[in-house]
Amino acid sequence: HHRTYKYFYQSAGHPMKPHRLSLTHSLVLHYGLYKKMMVRRS
């Protein structure tokens, strides 16, 4: 994830909160899922 993600405002009803993004990122790293992912950058 990009280091600036926490500075973006998501509306109150938006499901992807900064804390959830951090948790997801941590799980992906710790379970090694990143090895099976294809990342596209725009």
Image (tube, helix red, strand yellow):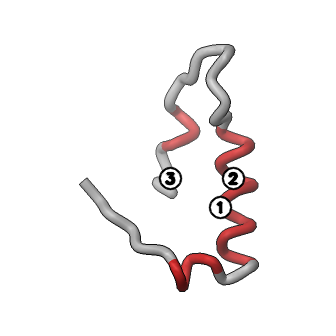
The amino acid sitting under disc 2 is Ser
Label 2: how many Cα within 10 Å (few below 14, some 14–19, many 20+): some
Of the residues shown, which amino acid type is indicated by label 3? Arg
* Residue matched to label 3: 3
Indicate the secondary structure of the residue bearing disc 3: loop
Question: As shown in the figure, which amino acid type bears the numbered disc 1?
Answer: His
Q: Secondary structure at mark 1?
A: helix
Task: Give the number of the mark in front: 1 or 3.
Answer: 1
Disc 2 designates what residue? Answer: 22
Residue 25 is left or right of residue 23, and the answer is left
- The residue indicated by pointer 1 is 25
Q: Residue at x 50, y 52 (%)?
A: 3
- At horizontal 54% and vertical 23% (from top left) the residue drawn is 9
Of badges 3 and 2, the one in the foreground is 2
For the residues marked 1 and 3, what is the alpha-carbon distance in whole angstroms?
Answer: 12 Å
Q: Secondary structure at mark 2?
A: helix
Instruction: Pinpoint residue 28: horizontal percent, then vertical percent.
Output: 66, 70
Q: Is residue 13 left or right of residue 10?
A: right
Measuring from the top left, give residue 40's x and y in whole percent. 32, 63
Q: Quadrant of residue 25?
A: bottom right
